[in-house]
Image (tube, rainbow, N blue to C red):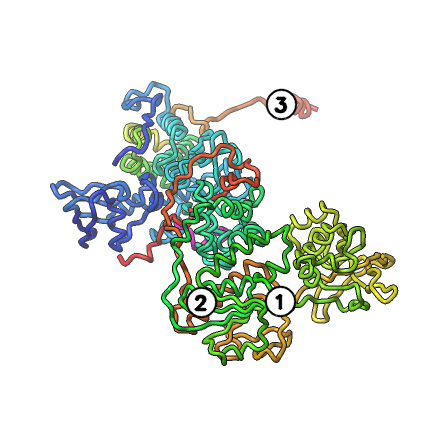
């Protein structure tokens, strides 16, 4: 189909980014970051670009935040497929291709986030465990 | 181009899109961002179809709105891939769209809702998005923007930019959100928006709606969209003549007016201007000065090109008598003559014009203008008999007239039922104005010479005509009325001009009696009121105790309305109020005798009388065997291109008395040229 805008997605990671993902980087978190960046670039004309990227961003963010829903993985794949078919926009096609590549190349990591509910890299905020010392005034009160 | 859609053969001219070709052939393809008056954007993907080209190859998914039909194409509108794409498109759009359709004013008129139902799609799989930018530009005068309902189809943006040539709307971005807004999110009044309403017209959802109350909901929508034209009793094409006037084509402007009104100059001075009362621009600032523009166009029409287009049909051999040469009678006579009938007008006064000649003072309506326009009307071959009072309308039929129209107006002024109302020194406004219209007139009425005191009882336009006429003769005039100042029936400018000319206005007064001294009126006893109403028992007032007073007056003028002066011996049945009993077509109890105008309706505006005259002419023409079609074309109608362009500072343009006033027009009529989008049920396949 014809492209309806000339946004190319300059500044986004290049194709192959997930094949050479740096050590320590989480593919789910990275996919979410790319989707959010793409969403902010959308010109607004195309439904699959404007709203499709918004959904990609929200669902990947939910995966990072441990708020994924059943069926999200299939929905993400379907979204990526249809954005590639129908967005008519080089930028959103690029984003969809990157997110799809993340899912294809890092299937285990996506299963961790969506099924086993963990982030192996310890990056995604929804899975981080923070421990903080209790406030001092509370400690003193207990001693009495 | 010849192709098949779902196996059905279709054909179209080259360059036509698959969508347009299919819809023309009665085959429905879902679509949302496409619109018959817009260049396709191909953004929503709902019109996606599968296409096999003549040269072979597998099926390709194509958006039907921006793919041209080619010879030999085989098109499928349904497949698993298409259904998946369409369903997902709706799901995506629903993610940030309210789910409660019933609360939307576009419920059951919404294209998006219709598509959801057609495609059986819901948005439950997608993450719900709560919009933050929906409050932007919600506060504007004419368009309700419920942007949470916007699906960003871009129709409003495209029609504003590509069709209207303005570009006030655009896609804006805020953080992660795309929304339709203006440059810098400026209020619409501060943009180039010309409030033409095209954006509202093409919006497929309830995101853009006309503010409630701007358009009447008791009229067919297309009619209501042009409030000035809808409100005019003869439906003058006001936007069209304003456009011509703006271009300096005054003769064409007058031609447009004359297609409906044979007295354009007169109405340029005295029209009640219902059009201005509902002018859409009044929601923005002030109504357009339509009446004044009409007057200017007539004054500047030196060419009078419309004259050459006027036609009188061949003689029918039928004769019509019109009783009364007021605006209703003259209008009816004019159109009946143009239908080919021989018309004789009987007028009891010395001059034709009725209330125009004897009721409206010359400072409001120049006598020469009235005479010129009546002369123009009579020139088509109407016989006028002045000083000819008709005693019996039915008798005219016996004299050989095939039809008679009684258009004698409401020629009898009413006096209030209060003590002293018949004393010498009291008179009705009609009697006063009639006397004033005669050469040397009101000067002969005792008490209207300079310095004397005149009390006018009434708050309508006739009351102000009498009050201002007396004031202009040097009298000390007080106008008293029941209504509070803000509720007076007279036109605002009449009230303002009257006050400026020295008429003392005392509103919220009830009249107790006309005071007497030496056998004649010496004043008016009045009392202040809080409120009043008219019920089954007549007038009810809530008087304020202790506010009684008697205002001195040498002359008391009653401007309390008029009534029909006909008596039973006129040959037609009258109702209990003394007005002719008429059927729907205006025919009275006497066969072939019709009645129209104020004589039937009671006192109304001049433009109402013209409308009544037109209606009567249609009915009488049909009665005489004609087609009743009195429409005429005095200037060819041109298709106005939808492009109106930018007019800097449009929303801030102030009402003026100059011809540039036309620039302020919102061009509401252009909206009627936008083609509607038909729902799936309009298509056979």
| Chain bearing mark 3 | A
Residue placed most toward the observer, B396 or A92? B396
Q: Residue at x 69, y 25 (%)?
A: A141
Q: Residues within 10 Å of mark 1 (few under 14, many from 20)?
A: many
The residue mark sitting in front, 3 or 2, is 2
Q: Residue at x 63, y 60 (%)?
A: B358
In contact (CB < 8 Å): disc 2 and disc 1: no
B101 magenta-colored:
yes
The residue mark sitting in front, 3 or 1, is 1
| Labels 3, 2: one chain | no
User: According to the image, label 3 marks what residue?
Assistant: A135
In the image, residue A23 above or below residue A119: above
Residue placed most toward the observer, B151 or B539? B539
| Labels 3, 1: one chain | no
User: According to the image, label 2 marks what residue?
Assistant: B618
Instruction: Provide residue B540's location: percent of width, then percent of height.
Output: 75, 65
Instruction: Report the quarter where the N terminus of chain A lies.
Output: top left
Secondary structure of the residue carrying tag 1 is loop
B379 magenta-colored:
no
Secondary structure of the residue carrying tag 3 is loop
In the image, residue B379 above or below residue B397: above
Real-space Cα distance between discs 2 and 1? 22 Å
User: According to the image, label 1 marks what residue?
Assistant: B410
Real-space Cα distance between discs 3 and 1? 93 Å
Residue B579 appearing in the image: yes
Instruction: Provide residue B233's location: percent of width, then percent of height.
Output: 51, 59
Q: Main secondary structure of the magenta part?
A: loop
| Chain bearing mark 1 | B
């Amino acid at each position: 189909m014809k492209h309806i805008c000339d946004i190319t997605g300059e500044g986004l990671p290049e194709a192959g980014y997930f094949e050479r993902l740096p050590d320590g980087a989480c593919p789910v978190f990275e996919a979410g970051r790319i989707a959010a960046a793409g969403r902010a670039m959308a010109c607004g004309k195309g439904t699959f670009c404007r709203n499709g990227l918004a959904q990609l961003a929200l669902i990947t963010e939910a995966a990072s935040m441990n708020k994924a829903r059943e069926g999200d993985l299939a929905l993400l794949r379907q979204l990526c497929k249809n954005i590639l078919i129908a967005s008519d926009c080089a930028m959103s096609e690029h984003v969809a291709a990157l997110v799809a590549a993340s899912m294809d190349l890092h299937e285990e990591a996506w299963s961790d986030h969506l099924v086993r509910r963990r982030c192996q890299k310890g990056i995604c905020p929804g899975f981080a465990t923070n421990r903080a010392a209790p406030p001092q005034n509370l400690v003193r009160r207990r001693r009495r | 181009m010849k192709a098949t859609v779902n196996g059905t053969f279709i054909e179209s001219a080259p360059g036509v899109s698959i969508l347009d070709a299919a819809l023309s052939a009665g085959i429905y393809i879902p679509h949302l961002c496409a619109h018959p008056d817009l260049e396709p954007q191909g953004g929503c993907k709902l019109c996606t179809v599968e296409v096999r080209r003549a040269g072979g190859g597998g099926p390709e998914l194509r958006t039907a709105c921006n793919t041209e039909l080619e010879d030999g194409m085989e098109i499928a509108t349904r497949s698993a891939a298409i259904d998946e794409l369409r369903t997902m498109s709706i799901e995506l759009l629903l993610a940030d769209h309210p789910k409660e359709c019933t609360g939307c004013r576009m419920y059951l008129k919404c294209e998006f809702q219709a598509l959801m139902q057609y495609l059986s799609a819901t948005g439950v799989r997608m993450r719900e998005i709560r919009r933050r930018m929906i409050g932007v530009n919600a506060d504007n005068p004419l368009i309700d923007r419920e942007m949470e309902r916007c699906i960003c189809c871009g129709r409003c943006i495209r029609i504003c930019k590509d069709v209207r040539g303005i570009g006030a709307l655009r896609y804006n971005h805020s953080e992660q959100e795309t929304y339709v807004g203006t440059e810098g999110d400026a209020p619409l009044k501060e943009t180039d928006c010309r409030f033409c309403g095209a954006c509202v017209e093409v919006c497929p959802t309830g995101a853009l709606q006309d503010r409630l109350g701007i358009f009447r909901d008791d009229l067919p929508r297309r009619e209501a969209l042009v409030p000035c034209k809808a409100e005019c009793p003869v439906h003058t094409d006001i936007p069209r003549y304003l456009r011509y006037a703006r271009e300096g084509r005054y003769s064409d402007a007058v031609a447009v007016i004359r297609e409906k009104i044979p007295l354009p100059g007169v109405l340029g001075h005295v029209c009640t201007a219902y059009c201005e009362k509902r002018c859409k621009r009044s929601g923005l600032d002030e109504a357009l000065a339509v009446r004044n523009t009409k007057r200017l166009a007539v004054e500047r029409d030196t060419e009078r090109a419309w004259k050459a287009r006027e036609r009188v049909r061949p003689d029918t051999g039928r004769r019509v008598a019109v009783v009364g040469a007021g605006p209703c009678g003259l209008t009816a006579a004019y159109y009946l003559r143009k239908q080919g009938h021989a018309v004789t007008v009987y007028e009891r006064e010395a001059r034709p014009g009725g209330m125009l000649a004897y009721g409206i003072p010359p400072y409001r309506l120049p006598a020469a203008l009235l005479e010129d326009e009546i002369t123009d009307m009579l020139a088509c071959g109407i016989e006028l008999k002045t000083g000819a009072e008709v005693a019996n309308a039915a008798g005219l039929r016996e004299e050989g007239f095939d039809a008679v129209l009684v258009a004698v107006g409401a020629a009898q002024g009413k006096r209030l039922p209060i003590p002293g109302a018949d004393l010498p020194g009291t008179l009705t406004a009609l009697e006063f104005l009639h006397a004033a219209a005669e050469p040397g007139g009101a000067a002969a009425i005792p008490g209207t010479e300079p310095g004397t005191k005149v009390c006018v009882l009434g708050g309508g336009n006739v009351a102000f005509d009498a009050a201002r006429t007396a004031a202009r003769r040097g009298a000390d005039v007080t106008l008293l009325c029941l209504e509070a100042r803000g509720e007076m029936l007279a036109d605002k400018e009449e009230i303002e001009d009257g006050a400026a000319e020295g008429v003392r206005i005392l509103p919220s007064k009830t009249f107790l009696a006309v005071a007497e001294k030496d056998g004649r009126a010496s004043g008016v006893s009045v009392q202040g009121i809080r409120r009043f109403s008219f019920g089954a028992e007549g007038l009810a007032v809530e008087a304020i105790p202790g506010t009684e007073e008697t205002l001195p007056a040498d002359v008391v003028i009653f401007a309390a309305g008029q009534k029909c002066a006909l008596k039973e011996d006129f040959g037609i049945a009258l109702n209990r109020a003394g007005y002719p009993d008429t059927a729907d077509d205006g025919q009275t109890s006497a066969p072939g005798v019709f009645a129209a105008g104020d004589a039937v309706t009671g006192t109304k505006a001049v433009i109402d009388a013209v409308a009544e005259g037109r209606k009567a002419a249609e009915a009488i023409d049909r009665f005489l065997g004609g087609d009743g079609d009195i429409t005429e074309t005095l200037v060819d109608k041109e298709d106005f291109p939808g492009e109106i362009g930018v007019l800097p500072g449009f929303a801030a343009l102030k009402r003026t008395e100059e011809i540039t006033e036309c620039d302020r027009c919102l061009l509401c009529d252009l909206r009627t040229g936008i083609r509607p989008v038909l729902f799936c049920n309009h298509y056979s396949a």
